[in-house]
Image (cartoon, grey):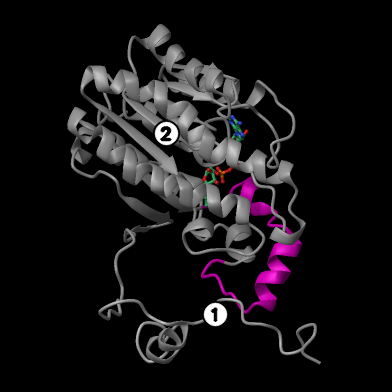
């Protein structure tokens, strides 16, 4: 047992499985008392079970730590409030809120139903609000706290068949950049991690998305075989970075996005101005085409160029 987080209380959403489970175990090993939240549904968010949260809370206790399970959905305000309440009721305070809960409902945008869109936004993005608001009220009063969100390269770089997930994960990037500014003066930080790890979520990437990605010539540095064969992509590799962000040592790391995969930790850039073209007065569309193609658009690449035999092109 370490003591990096001695005396602190953490709540981890989606703590019953995958990356969240390993975070619960490590935060507890580092001395934190943990609320293990998990709805216990499928990767697609169907169903519910008390098993995953209960099992992880028991595992923490078996290893000599302190934990309580919470079975509520992060996608409701009441569920989010219950997580902070359970921390305060059982352990007297809350210092660390990690929002790891997530689901996938991949579909190409032209086929995506409203339900598929809403379900994914509700868990990841609305969930970020539902769990962060009550936690940040406590953090503000105690003048300290850590909010840690989970994003994804699918949102930050773009990925085929994931407009719902991508929008939610990019939304989390915007959320932490902004929450960092709301909360920094109270001694609270907000950061996010885009992880890559072999979990049930990456075990069965939908074939439709894989095929579309291959057709579009989009290559990933991590393939299916890597997810199945380990290769350092164990979810345990993400937890130490969470423990660091949650600690007092990370007091000035605020509003940042990191990619973590195996032994690699990368600080990602926040959006910044890349190139600007300016004239006195307004541009015409023709001028934008002529000047822009030689300046600001000169080396842009279409991530999914039209197929050579595109419909209507003969
Ligand atoms: N594994 C990866 O490579 C990867 C890549 C990019 C982003 N992520 C993100 O990391 C996070 C963890 O993913 P994972 O790979 O461990 O997935 P996972 O499916 O193994 O774990 C997600 C957990 O969230 C829980 N959950 C789902 N909906 C919930 C709800 N409404 N309320 C409470 N709990 C709920 C699930 O029951 C599950 O235990 C997710 O936010 C995911 O989007 C993972």
Mark 2 residue element: strand
Q: Is residue 247 above or below residue 89?
A: below
- Residue corresponding to mark 1: 302
Badge 2 crowding class, 10 Å Cα cut-off, few under 14, some 14 to 19, many 20 or more, is many
Tell me, yes or no, whether the highlighted magenta stretch contains residue 301.
no
Q: Is mark 1 within 8 Å of ligand 1?
A: no
Q: Is residue 103 above or below residue 74?
A: below
Check the picture and name the quadrant holding the C terminus: bottom right
Nearer the observer, 292 or 8: 292
Q: Which residues are magenta?
A: 197-222
Judge by depth and name the residue closer to the eye, 22 or 242: 242
Q: Position of residue 296 (x, y in %)?
A: 36, 82
Q: Position of residue 9 (x, y in %)?
A: 34, 20
Quarter of the rendering containing residue 282: bottom left
Residue at (41%, 19%) from the top-left corner? 64
Q: Residue at x 66, y 39 (%)?
A: 119
Image coordinates for residue 98, horizontal then vertical, percent: 42, 33
Horizontal side of 45 relative to 173 (left or right) equals right
Question: Quarter of the image containing the N terminus?
Answer: top left
Under 8 Å from ligand 1: the CB of mark 2? no
Q: State the residue lying farthest toward the top.
A: 89
Q: Is residue 294 above or below residue 61?
A: below
Going 73% across and 53% down the picture, which residue do you hit?
112
């Amino acid at each position: 047992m370490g003591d990096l987080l001695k005396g602190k209380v953490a709540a981890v959403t989606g703590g019953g499985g995958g990356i969240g489970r390993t975070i619960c175990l490590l935060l507890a090993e580092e001395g934190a008392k943990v609320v293990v939240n998990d709805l216990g549904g499928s990767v697609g968010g169907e169903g519910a079970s008390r098993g995953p949260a209960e099992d992880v809370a028991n595992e923490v206790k078996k290893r000599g730590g302190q934990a309580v399970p919470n079975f509520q959905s992060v996608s409701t305000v009441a569920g989010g409030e219950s997580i902070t309440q359970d921390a305060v009721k059982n352990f007297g305070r809350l210092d660390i809120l990690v929002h790891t809960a997530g689901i996938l409902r991949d579909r190409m945008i032209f086929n995506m139903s409203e339900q598929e869109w809403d379900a994914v936004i509700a868990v990841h993005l609305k969930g970020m609000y539902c769990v962060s608001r009550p936690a940040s009220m406590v953090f503000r009063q105690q003048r300290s706290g850590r909010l840690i969100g989970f994003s994804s390269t699918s949102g930050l770089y773009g990925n085929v068949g994931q407009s719902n997930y991508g929008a939610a994960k990019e939304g989390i990037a915007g959320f932490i950049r902004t929450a960092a500014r709301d909360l920094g003066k109270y001694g609270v930080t907000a950061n996010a991690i885009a992880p890559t790890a072999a979990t049930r979520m990456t075990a069965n990437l939908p074939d439709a998305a894989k095929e579309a990605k291959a057709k579009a010539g989009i290559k990933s540095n991590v393939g299916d075989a890597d997810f199945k064969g380990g290769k350092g992509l164990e979810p345990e590799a993400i937890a130490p970075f969470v423990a660091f962000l949650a600690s007092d040592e990370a007091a000035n790391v605020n509003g940042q996005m990191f990619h973590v995969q195996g032994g690699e930790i990368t600080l990602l850039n926040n959006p910044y101005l890349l190139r600007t073209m300016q004239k006195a007065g307004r541009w015409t569309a023709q001028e934008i085409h002529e000047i822009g193609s030689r300046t600001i658009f000169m080396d842009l690449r279409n991530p999914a160029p039209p197929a050579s035999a595109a419909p209507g092109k003969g």
